[in-house]
Image (cartoon, rainbow, N blue to C red):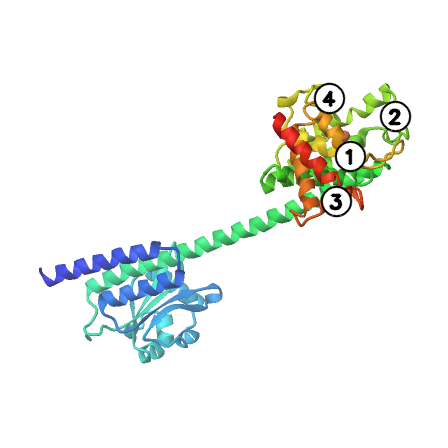
Amino acid sequence: MVPSTQKLIHTFGALADLGQEVANTGDFSEMVRTSMHLLLGTLALRRGAVAESGSGRVLTCLALWGLDEGLFVQLEIHEEDETEFLESELSALLVAQGQSAFLKRHQALLGREGIELIVPMVVQNKLTGFVLLGGKASGEEFSAEDFETIRAMVRHIGVGIHTHRLIEQVAQRAEENRRLYEELRAIYRDTVRAFAAAIDIKDKYTQGHSERVGRYSEIIAREMGWSEDEVEGIQIAGYLHDVGKLVVDRNIINAPYHIDAKLSSELNRHPAAGYEILAPINHPYADIPLMAKYHHERLDGRGYPDGLTDEQIPLGAKIVSLADSFDAMTTDRPYRRRRSIEDVVRDLRQNSGKQFDSKVVVAFARAILKELTGETKERRIIKMLGKGYLDGEQVPTLLSDLIVELDCNR
Ligand SMILES: [Fe+2]
């Protein structure tokens, strides 16, 4: 083979290797180092370096061979240098010829260090940095072919560095966006909790009701295997389920006795009113307005506002419904004391399949049982119910029996 053909094939091979190296986004420093060594190896050069020009025209050395890193501290770039380099595009500048103001200023220093060529890396009309190259090991002069090879390889390296920085910027923006989104979510959650507290203040007998319904709903949904995002959504739905009470007369909500049919139909407006309030809001979780609207629906169709039946009721609304009723049964009201856990379990058994979804009841019973047996370290339900409420010896058995019975009936 003719020597120049051999050389051409060798150069092509090096370019192909370089292309692969540049496309490898894994280890950036390694990519620059290997690319530089490919360039030095292809032309058998004694020394070289790749430097990036950062903000404030400071040069950062990314890779070097046979040179001292201290050199880069002494290389200053001025505004006019940048213009000159951009105009020169990718041509290699011979240090000995002092073709630019930059070279004129640093000619002596670069000469001492054995640097013969400076090649600016220009990508999309911006100076990305330089490649500094020493002379050939053979002592030969650079040929026109060599300059072509250098030009092509430096272009590859420049594009590699530029692309890497772009990817870094995109990742940084994505991280900033993620943080902003987290902050917004936190603000939304705090606002919702403040709102829940406002709803409960209107109803003086059920302090903390909305907050507890939110927590019970969250516990049930998690027990049912919902994703963390969905769990967070249903917790919000629990907090807001009674938001419609804000439009109901305070005297009806706070009536210290069982209210008559007329007043009760006024009170029963609250789920639909809640939907009207929540629907125009762009919630970060799905179906929150529907969960509020249907939290008084029953599987047997005797609920309100729409008298939906089993399959028509969203699962989330069924969860909030159980959490709501459970809290109503286990807290004191003006006209009655709270019911015992034995009584509550009896109610859940009787009303499963009629008012409550058996799957949801089973999940809730399981979550309570896990706290009682110590299977979960958290004791959130126990804390919400207060000291002693679940202490009865028979409680775990009652819950296990309920789970077995409802599981069998399904
Ligand atoms: Fe309600």
Q: Position of residue 264 (x, y in %)?
A: 83, 23
The residue beneath circle 3 is 382
**First-in-chain label (1 vs 3):** 1
Q: Position of residue 377 (x, y in %)?
A: 67, 50
Is mark 2 in CB contact (under 8 Å) with mark 1?
A: no
Q: How far apart in space, not on screen, are marks 4 and 2 (Cα)?
A: 18 Å
- Considering the numbered disc 4 on the image, is that residue within a helix, a strand or a loop? loop
The residue beneath circle 4 is 303
How many residues crowd mark 2 within 10 Å: few (<14), some (14–19), many (20+)?
Answer: few
Q: Nearer the viewer, residue 227 or 195?
A: 227
**First-in-chain label (3 vs 4):** 4
How many residues crowd mark 4 within 10 Å: few (<14), some (14–19), many (20+)?
Answer: some
What residue type is disc 3 on?
Ile
What residue type is disc 4 on?
Gly
Residue at mark 4: C-beta within 8 A of ligand 1: no
**Which corner quadrant of the figure contains ligand 1?**
top right
**First-in-chain label (2 vs 1):** 2
